[in-house]
Image: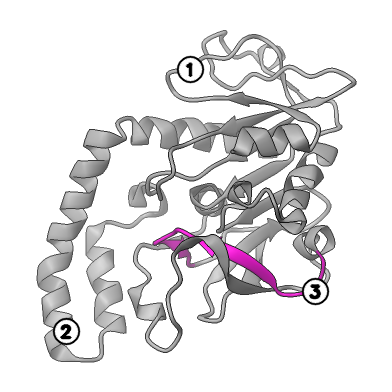
Amino acid sequence: MTARAIRRAGGRPLRITPARHPPRGRLDGLVIGGGADVDPGLYGQDPLHLMREIDASEPASGQRLLAFLLYPLLWLLRRLLRTRHHGGDRARDRLEETLIRRALADGLPVLGICRGMQLLNVVHGGTLHQDLEGFYREVPRVRSVLPRKSVTLTPGSRLEALTGPAPLAVNALHHQAVDRLGRGLRAVAREPSGLVQAIEASGPRFVLGVQWHPEYLPQKMRHQRLFRGLVRAAGGPGWDLHRHGSSPRDPSTMRSDHRSRKVSSRLDPFRL
């Protein structure tokens, strides 16, 4: 779906994974997509932090005790299943962290989607909420591939310029979210619970992250403008992998010509 959205926007997508080494060429932009949880060790946390979040969010002592008893087991089960069915998550973390850092250093446009937004925040030194149950005591929690959640955009932001100022209807498939913002980032969309739904870098660079999945909303022009904005921003000189001294096995190369911009997209199964 992400590849199709990039093509419709005028770009040429190339999938990059730890096991898939792309051909020689040039990278013009980067999309980091959804998938398994970002390793909490990358932002200095461990499973015990989940229990501290529960302790702060559970007012009833009985509920809090039950949460303390069950959450380590649930966390371990999630880790085991993730390792079994989505092997190489740590390899993916390392790959995508490297790609983001290099893209930022070279001034390439970056779009983070769901997990991609979270990793973008972590790379900038931010942290994540590893569980969101405490945020939905007074506001209903929405989980749907359809645009059933409304988010409010920050006036004057790049996101608002791309999609327009009206509240934006988005889908919701995530169970983690941005907590402390990374350096140089600002929140540019929030949901009614107060959770951050979009972030972007200060200044003129196209560095944008959204918590929802615009690639699953091809019928919604406001969402597709995110990909058009990315492809337009990819009109610079690009990133020549081998000119930067990397080996041919480095999975981050892109090729581009004057007719269309080639954008790296990390495509993943429909899972968060």
Q: Earlier in the sequence, mark 2 or mark 1?
A: 1
176 part of magenta stretch: yes
Mark 1: amino acid:
Arg
Spatial CA distance of label 2 from label 3 is 40 Å
Question: Badge 3 is on which residue?
Answer: 155
Q: Which residue is drawn at 12% across and 67% down?
A: 70
Q: Nearer the viewer, residue 150 or 104?
A: 150
Q: Is mark 1 on a helix, strand or loop?
A: loop
Asked where in the image residue 150 lies, by quadrant, the reply is bottom right
- Between 118 and 48, the residue placed more toward the observer is 118
Q: Do we see residue 238 in this rendering?
A: yes
Question: Which badge, 2 or 3, is on the more N-terminal residue?
Answer: 2
Q: What element carries label 3?
A: loop
Say which residue appears at 57% left-offset and 25% top-offset.
15
Q: Circle 1 is placed at which residue position?
A: 20
Real-space CA distance between mark 2 and mark 1, rounded to the nearest whole angstrom: 46 Å
**Residue 228: where, in percent of width, then height?**
80, 44
Question: What colour scheme has been applied to the protein in the rendered image?
Answer: one colour
Q: Is residue 184 inside the magenta stretch?
A: no
Q: Is mark 2 on a helix, strand or loop?
A: helix
Front-lying residue, 20 or 129 = 20
Residue 149 shown left or right of residue 87 in the figure:
right
Magenta segment range?
164-179
Answer with the quarter of the image where residue 28 lies. Answer: top right
Question: Which residue, given by chain and number where applicable, does mark 2 sit on?
Answer: 63
Q: Type of residue at label 3?
A: Pro
Would residue 101 be visible to someone looking at this image? no
Identify which residue is drawn at 71% across, 74% down: 167
Farthest residue to the front: give it: 219
Relative image position of residue 57 (x, y in whole percent)? 31, 82
Counting residues from the start of the chain, the first of labels 3 and 1 encountered is 1
